[in-house]
C-alpha cells in the first residue's frame, strides 16, 4: 500500500524530510516504524526512543498497534504540551 508519511519537529530534522510517500507492506504503525528504521541510520536514530514519539493515522491520534488497513496518512511527532 502507499502511505503519505509526515514527520514533525526533531523527527523531521533527524530524517531530513517533512513528508514522503512510502510503499509498505506494514500491517500496523509499529510495523511501519520497523520498516523505516531498517532503511537507513537516520530513521533508526529518529525512532530510537519511542517514548518520545506519538503518531496519528489519518489525523487521529492512535497507538502504535493500530492497523494501517485503509489508511492514507501517518504522522509522527513528539508529545504535545499545553500551557
Image (spheres, grey):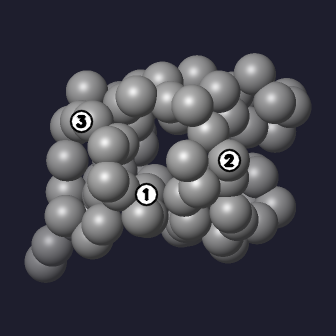
Q: Is residue 59 left or right of residue 73?
A: left
Residue highlighted by disc 1: 74
Regarding mark 3 in the picture, which secondary structure is present there?
Answer: loop
Residue highlighted by disc 3: 66
For the residue pair 50 and 6, the one nearer the viewer reads as: 6
Query: In 3D space, how far apart are the residues under numbered discs 2 and 1 (Cα atoms)?
Result: 12 Å
Residue 20: which numbered mark, if any? Answer: none
Q: Of the residues under marks 1 and 3, which one precedes in the sequence? A: 3
Please tell me which residue is depicted at 67% across the width and 72% down the height of the picture: 18
Please tell me which residue is depicted at 48% across the width and 24% down the height of the picture: 31
Residue at far right of view:
40
Q: Is residue 17 left or right of residue 5?
A: right
Near mark 1 (Cα within 10 A), the count class, few <14, some 14-19 or many ≥20, is many
Near mark 2 (Cα within 10 A), the count class, few <14, some 14-19 or many ≥20, is few
Please tell me which residue is depicted at 30% across the width and 66% down the height of the picture: 58
Quadrant in the picture for residue 57: bottom left
Query: In 3D space, how far apart are the residues under numbered discs 2 and 3 (Cα atoms)?
Result: 18 Å
Q: Is residue 52 above or below residue 81?
A: above
Q: Position of residue 20 (x, y in %)?
A: 70, 65
Regarding mark 2 in the picture, which secondary structure is present there?
Answer: strand
Please tell me which residue is depicted at 56% across the width and 65% down the height of the picture: 4
Q: Position of residue 30 (x, y in %)?
A: 41, 26
Regarding mark 1 in the picture, which secondary structure is present there?
Answer: strand
Q: Of the residues under marks 2 and 1, which one precedes in the sequence? A: 2
Residue highlighted by disc 2: 23
Amino acid at each position: 500500500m502507499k502511505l503519505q508519511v509526515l514527520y514533525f519537529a526533531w523527527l523531521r530534522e533527524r530524517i531530513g524530510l517533512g513528508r514522503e510517500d512510502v510503499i509498505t507492506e506494514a500491517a500496523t504503525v509499529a510495523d511501519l516504524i520497523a520498516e523505516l528504521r531498517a532503511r537507513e541510520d537516520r530513521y533508526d536514530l529518529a525512532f530510537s526512543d519511542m517514548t518520545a514519539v506519538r503518531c496519528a493515522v489519518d489525523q487521529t491520534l492512535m497507538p502504535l498497534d493500530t492497523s494501517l488497513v485503509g489508511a492514507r496518512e501517518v504522522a509522527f511527532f513528539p508529545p504535545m504540551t499545553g500551557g
